[in-house]
Amino acid sequence: MAALAIIEASSPQSGNGDSDVARAAAGDRGAFERLYRQNVNRVFSLCARMVSDRERAEELTQDVFVRAWDKLHLFRGESSFSTWLHRLTVNVVLNARKSEGRQRSRFEENDEEAGGMDALPGVVGMPLPPGDLLDLEDAIAKLPPGARRVFVLHDVEGYKHEEIADMLGVTSGATKAQLHRARLLLREALNR
Amino acid sequence: MTNPMMCDEFADRLSDYLEGDVDASTRIAIEAHAASCDTCGALLADLRRLQVDASKLPELSPKRDLWAGIAARIQTPVVELKNGGTVERWNGGTEKPARTSRLWIGLAAAGLIAVTATITHELTKRSIAIAPSQRTAAVQSRPDTTRRATPATQVANIDSVPPFHPSTVPPSRSTGPAAATTRLASSKASAKPSAEQTYEAEISRLRAVLNYRRPQLDSSTVAVVEHNLRVIDDAIAQCKQALRKDPASRFLMESLNDALDTKVQLLRTAATLPSTS
């Protein structure tokens, strides 16, 4: 959970954020807008990396905050608002994936079975110098969806395998296998 | 230079090693092999660096401000529209009334959606009318008002639900923002419309809102909505056609209810889509 700890520690307005959470829960849209401003980039980052589509990520980001507004009365303060919102974001993204239809699922299965980046000629594009974060961002976007989700949740966001397995409805062994596959694919892409 | 056997084992255990899932002796063996094998050593170094780099990725930002779309969607609960387009919030909140036409239109749509949500609540207690020959048997079923009713229980509930009279609000009034000011429950009616008629009335209203907002919506999104509506309309037509041949079919009635409900839900969602900037 290293990433989450960083998120909470780096929250510049955590004091005001707490009162804004209470105000927003009571229906104050101004307070909720402040919470949005504080958290939108982090929510969007997670959405964008999980779905690898900026426009879709923007839609999902809006969905997350609408859902947060609806569910805010359920927030008990047992974790920080950031952590709660982060988990809500994961749920929204994963639920959206589930509901996006059989045709897309079939596409993703084919994508997964085809072996990753090598099965997508031309998507990697120009040769990538190793180590550059922009290149890493680009390479993550081109991972097969299953491997990408696990990599983002584990290596970028800091979730544990057991948590990811629970979110995705698979075993932790499966998430470990996906993670290792993702890392090897990324290494290959970044060393081309 | 490299020991194939040891490299294979290294590859097999590398994932567990990186996750910290190996015992001390295995860890030592892996690290010793990585130190002695250039290929495996480079692999381990790359994967470690990848882990570090992934944890340092910076936050991304959306290309546009998403708040307007969120604000429009969370305005839905109760919105009273006054003459002249001034918006007053239900809770008398601290915010100033919104005055921009785009937001006003969005709120008008949202208000109508809130009204139609109430109507849908009523509709969940009702159903497409069952064939008269089935009514007696159906009424004997135990009604369940806590969840979506089956056709049998729906029929049993019909007479116990306060009637809703969409005919008192002409569809033409629902075109444009003023639609949100419609008063749906204030009328007296001499005859109860069927649930299907009520659905159709709601669909008509939501259609009007969607048509009104069309210029502010993304054209490709609207195209997807229209395509999905055609699919639903096909399903509705097929259900009706099949019901003519088998009017007692519970499955067909449920299917028709579901299709009409889906259409209302889709139109409601489409009518409150955020405007393109």
Image (cartoon, coloured by chain):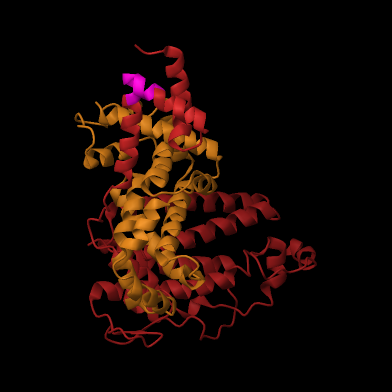
Across and down, in percent, residue B266 comes to 45, 59
Across and down, in percent, residue A50 comes to 37, 46
Q: Is residue B199 visible?
A: yes
As for residue B35 lying within the magenta part, the answer is yes
Chain shown orange: that is A
> Which quarter shows the C terminus of chain A?
top left
Across and down, in percent, residue B131 comes to 70, 61
Question: In the displayed structure, would residue B143 be above or below residue A148?
Answer: below
Give the image quarter of residue B216.
bottom left
Q: Is residue B226 visible?
A: no
Question: Where are the magenta residues, as a range?
Answer: B33-41
Question: In the displayed structure, would residue B135 be above or below residue A134?
Answer: below
Residue occupying the point 52% across, 50% down: B235
Residue occupying the point 50% across, 28% down: B26
Give the main secondary structure, helix, strand or loop, of the magenta stretch: helix
Chain shown red: that is B
Give the image quarter of residue B277.
bottom left
Taking the image as shown, residue B84 lies to the left or right of residue B30, namely left
The residue nearer to you, when weighing A191 against B182, is A191
